[in-house]
Every structure is written in structure tokens, then in C-alpha cells.
Image (cartoon, coloured by chain):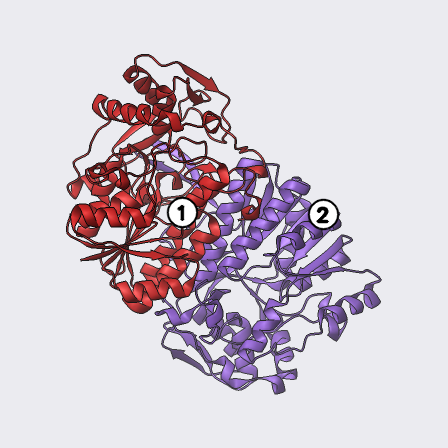
Chain colours: A purple, B red
Amino acid sequence: MRILVLGGDGYLGWPTALHLSRAGYEVGVADNFARRGYDLEMGVDSLVPIASLHQRVDCWEDVSGKRLEAFIGDLTDESFVYDMVGSFRPDAVVHFAEHTQVNNVVGTLNVLYAIAEIDPSIHLVKLGTMGEYGTPNIDIEEGYIEITHRGRTDVLPFPKQPGSFYHLSKVHDSHNIAFCCRAWGLRSTDLNQGVVYGQSTPETTLHPDLATRFDYDAVFGTVLNRFVIQAAAGEPLTVYGKGGQTRGFLDIRDTLACIELAIRHPAKAGEFRVFNQFTESFSVSELAQMVSDAAGGAEIVHLEDPRVEAEEHYYRAAHTKLLDLGLMPFLLGDELLADLLSIARSHIGRLERGALEPKVRWRSTSSTITRRGRSKPEESSAERPV
Amino acid sequence: MRILVLGGDGYLGWPTALHLSRAGYEVGVADNFARRGYDLEMGVDSLVPIASLHQRVDCWEDVSGKRLEAFIGDLTDESFVYDMVGSFRPDAVVHFAEHTQVNNVVGTLNVLYAIAEIDPSIHLVKLGTMGEYGTPNIDIEEGYIEITHRGRTDVLPFPKQPGSFYHLSKVHDSHNIAFCCRAWGLRSTDLNQGVVYGQSTPETTLHPDLATRFDYDAVFGTVLNRFVIQAAAGEPLTVYGKGGQTRGFLDIRDTLACIELAIRHPAKAGEFRVFNQFTESFSVSELAQMVSDAAGGAEIVHLEDPRVEAEEHYYRAAHTKLLDLGLMPFLLGDELLADLLSIARSHIGRLERGALEPKVRWRSTSSTITRRGRSKPEESSAERPV
């Protein structure tokens, strides 16, 4: 089987490409290096140094004997997308390549049109986010909910209350893809992923040039990775507000396993299938305490919450469909935390301490573009209106 | 009060501008003439001839003594939007200017950013569509629904199942606007409008140069107007499929009244308010029969449904909030139908018979861009991917 990984140079896209290549799939990776561009814009870099895509691809060939086919280009470029899908001829497309509203909406529409015109049987595996749901006061189901209302019953898309422009863009794409499944008979799996932690996978640890990103800045750094780096640096762990914000989490290795499970068990023609892709729920305070304990008692401080979100709320979300397909989760424990702390400590000389502070204003328009639930900094005025 | 009408040169935007001007508001109109461009692209024109925007504005000044301020430009042009909002300083923005996904998402984001930065108290009255809801098997409520699930209850956005790329784009904007109300404290009313019929308003009939569009083509012509023109031309009324497709409808004069009611009773700061803007529900077959009767027995034929939609389905949608604000509806009756037939007959020499036929393929990608629930023709390949 042939798998095309869009956003294949990123934090999760790269390890996914390696995992699938090792598992025996023929893998292509596509990227426009937008993420590396944001590093330059923000003046910050992954704590663990990462090789260029060309170096990575060559290194993987040396290590594994397998060659990844690389496509450099932008999904908003329609002819790039058509030529890539037409020449690579994937059986499945794994779509990580999303960040802003125009990029997502246009890029994903280009991917949908290319699939529909070139081969409608291609399975689109799109990485969504649990953030599409927001924090409703009822249990979150996997994509759909049965509603009984005034004596009648229907199964309808679960209502969405995304909390940032980034999450909104994922909601737009979910609606567009669902329509294309309904109207054109395409097949798609939407993986509404929780917050990912971890940095090592069985493949990325085979050579330093295969390492993936380890981010800690206020825009792209996910919370657990950021706490670990703060602890390694001897800085206090910064909790926003009360720390009661609860979300679903998963180990990076489970991300790879979930994507392979979705590929191995594809959606049916016409089906828009939604899986909630996380393994455990934690509050921010719980995570801070776990990292503090693992680091031998790091200080925890509470900052005023810069985001517009409930600091304490109900949160319970279903996540059984991937378990039903055979997922065996890595749960968060001392071993993972010790491994992450060790990685962080060995690269702590590369830390830019200023990048740990929250810089994004969420209550006014200066918060601009969001990604991974955080906003890009004010400097990115060029992209402000999207 | 100062009101800016975006899309003020269109079928509904123009009569709305006149209505508000006559009611005593200071009115500005903005348009990029995209709708007139589609006429050129499709080789078809409004059955009733329409004057240019400059002619219309001059004519209205002659007739009423009031001057509309005209802004010619595209909402995807951020500086155009900022300059317009900053110089006109509206109390409310009435937003009709939506057609495709990039235009809507980018244009509406520009409007939101301009409002937030220039004056967050500006009330955004956005024209949505009942088509955002699709045809669920439960009663449709006005924007939100109380859901009790596993013993807990919350009021959540009503789930959306839009049936075209046009309706999808309205869903995207609804989500973006709701977020800006939540995060930035903006105020907005989303008017989920049914299918509009009629062509005359008290203002447009004051002079031929004030007339608004009367469309019958397969892309932009709404169903009742199209039946009337078919009857006037002695052509059979063409029902798609069984004709059990049921939707909410309203008279063009009620559109104007609803918008004025929304403006006079603005949403509160931080509120994203949703009204379902229609007055009666009809099936397509019922409408065909009414027009046939009014025309003295016009033939009705059933064509294979070119759309992906249920030809028979449950449909019941709440629409009490505008009535509660004081709407006195014009219900569909013989007088309106006789008036419309008379208008159509007096311009029937302008009819392009070929434009009455459905040309859009809904089950494959050649159906391209959709607007008002219909697709743009295949020729519009330039905009295909959006």
C-alpha cells in the first residue's frame, strides 16, 4: 500500500512517515516548510536539533534501506496537489498539513478535488483535534450524537464550539470533507486528536538525524513537553489560571499506531468516520504535579490565563473506537517522564528562556492566527486577517 | 443610525439599502459586482433589466432626496474593508456579500477584524441560510438546541449538515463569527434565511431604474421565481425528482422587514444570536401547483433530481423569534403570484430558454462552486478548487 503524508516534515508527520515506512508501506512526504518558517519568524527553534528534510530522507535510506519520496510544495497550489496525487497514486492520504484558515480550507479542498478526480477510492485520513468540540457540559461522543428532541430522534454531527481560529479551521475542514463523502462518495477518517506528548519513537531514535521536533514556545509547544523543558531548565512550571483545564492526551507513539490502524481499517465509500484519538484525560494542574514530582520537586506557579477558556469545567469524552480496532496505549508514567527530562536536559543549552513566556493576547485581535490551540505572535501581521 | 450594506448591488442587498434609506437610516452600499460578473460568465441576465449601481444611486437620490454612499471593492482586500469601515463608521453592518468559500471565509474575517479594531460595538447582521441545517429528522431550532445526554444537559449550537459548498461556506462563517463574539465580545445576529420569492418592494417600484434582479437560471434562480417565469413563457414547470423537498420560504418584503427588526433590536455585546428568517414551509410540488393554478393550469413535469438531496423528508423548523420582535409576514397568495406573473410576462422577450435547464452535476466534482444552494457552471474552472 502507498501512503502520502501531508505535512510530513512536522512534529508528528515525520515520525508517522518513518513508522509507516518501517511497517512496510511505500511512503511519500509532502511539505512546504511553513513550520520551519515560523521558527524563523518567532526567533526560536526546536530544543532538539532537527535535520533538513533532505538529510532526514537520506539518513532513513541509510538506516532502513527504504526511500521516502519527497514532494516540496504548497497545498493551496492546485496543480502541485493534482500532480502529486496523480503521480504518487496513494491508497491513503494522511493529512497533517494544516495551520491557518486559508491554508486549511483551500488546501483541503484541493486535496478533496484531486482525490475525487484522480481516484475516489483513496482513503483520506485527516488529523483533526479534540479542540473542535470545545468543553460542553455533556459527554463528548466520537463525531456524532443521537439526539431525541420533541419526540423524534436522529444521529447528528456533534455540535462544535472550537476555541481558537486554528480549531475553527479544523471544524471548517470537517464539514467540507463530510459533505464530499456524502455528495461524491469519498471515504475519510477524521482523527480528532488530543494533546500529544513525547519526542521519541522507535524510528526517530535510530539516528540523531531522524529526530523530530521538541517545542516549548508559547505558540507551538504542547503543555507537557513545555513543563518538562521548564523543569529541565530549573524554571518554574507555569500553569495558566487555576489549572483545571482538562483535555485528552496521548503519547506520540500512540499517534503513529492510531494512524496505522485507521489506514489498515479504512472507511467505507461515502463514509465520514470520526475517531477521538487520545488515551487519557488530565487537568493542567495534574500534569504540572506529575512533571514536578518526576523532576524531584520543581516549583509550580500560576499565571493569569491569557486564553479565553474555562479554567474549571466538566470534561468527559468517549475514545473507544481506536481501542476497538486494537490500540494498546502507552499510558503516561514515570518512565516516559524520565526519558523526556533526560532528552530536555541533554539539549538545555539550546533553550531561549524568553520563548517560555505567554506572548499571545487572546482577548483582542492582536492574537491573530492560531495553531495547535495557540496564536501566532503579533508580528505576523501579514497573515492577520486569516 | 448608519448602516453599511455589504453586497448592496444584489437581489436582496439593493432593496434592503433602499428600504433602510427610506426608513431614515444613513446607508452605505458595498459591492465588487461579482454577481453581474456571473451573468457575463453564464451568458444570462436578470429577466427584469437592472440599472448600473451608479444609475441606481442617482435615481434614488432623484426620487427620495437621499444619497447612498457607494463603496466599490472586494471584501478579501483587507485595506478596502478597514478604510470603508473606518470612514463610514456604521452602527450596523448588514452582510449579504457571500458566495464562495475563500470569498466568505477571508471576507468575513476581514470584516470581523475591522469591526473589532475600529469599533467593537458595531452590530454585524449576517445573512445566513436555513440550508446550514440540512434536513435532520428532528425539529430545527433557531441556532441552538438543548441536549440532554447521559444525564447531563447543555444548550449547544444546532448541528449543521449543509448540502452544498455554498451552504458550507455559510457554516464556516457562522462558526468564525460565534467565536469572535465569545472571545472578543463582538455582537452579531445570524439571519438563517429561507428561500426568498418576489421581486417588487415599495421602493423598487418607484422607478424602473430602482428594480432589483429577477433570476431564473439553474444557478441563481430561486424556485418560485423560476416557476413563475416558466409559466409566463408557456414552458412546463420543472420539478426536480418527486418534489417532496420542503424548505422555508419568505416574501422579499419580509426580508427587508426582518433586517430592520434585527437592526432596531441589536444583539448584546458578546452575543451571537440566531434567527430563522422565513414565514412558511412548502414542498416544491406544492409551489409548482400554486403557480400552475395562478397561471391558469400550467403543465408540471418531473425531471431527474440533479442534486444530492432527499426528495421526501421530515421538515419542521422553528421561526418565532422574528415574529416575537414584531414581524407581520406577507404570506404567499394569489395576489403576489399574479403580480409576479405580470412582471414576468412584461419582460418575457428577454428570456433565454436554455438557461431554464439544470446544468449542474452534483454527484461529481464538475459541479464546482455553489451559491444559493446551486452550483456555478462547469466553465468556472478558475474557481474550481474553492
In the rendered structure, the answer to whether residue B253 lies left or right of residue A214 reads left
> Residue visible at 29% across and 45% down?
B14
| Quadrant of the rendered image containing residue B86 | bottom left
Which residue matches tag 1? B170
- Looking at the image, can residue B385 be seen? no
Q: Nearer the viewer, residue B360 or B149?
A: B360
Residue A63: give x, y in percent of width and height: 82, 67
Q: Is disc 2 on the same chain as disc 1?
A: no
Residue B138: give x, y in percent of width and height: 36, 34
Image height of A343 relative to B12, above or below: below
Residue B50: give x, y in percent of width and height: 33, 39
> Residue visible at 39% across and 43% down?
B159
| Quadrant of the rendered image containing residue A340 | bottom right
Which residue matches tag 2? A86
Q: Nearer the viewer, residue B153 or A384?
A: A384
Residue A299: give x, y in percent of width and height: 46, 83
Q: Nearer the viewer, residue A1 or A107?
A: A107
> Residue visible at 38% across and 20% down?
B233
In the rendered structure, the answer to whether residue B14 lies left or right of residue A262 reads left
- Looking at the image, can residue B60 be seen? yes
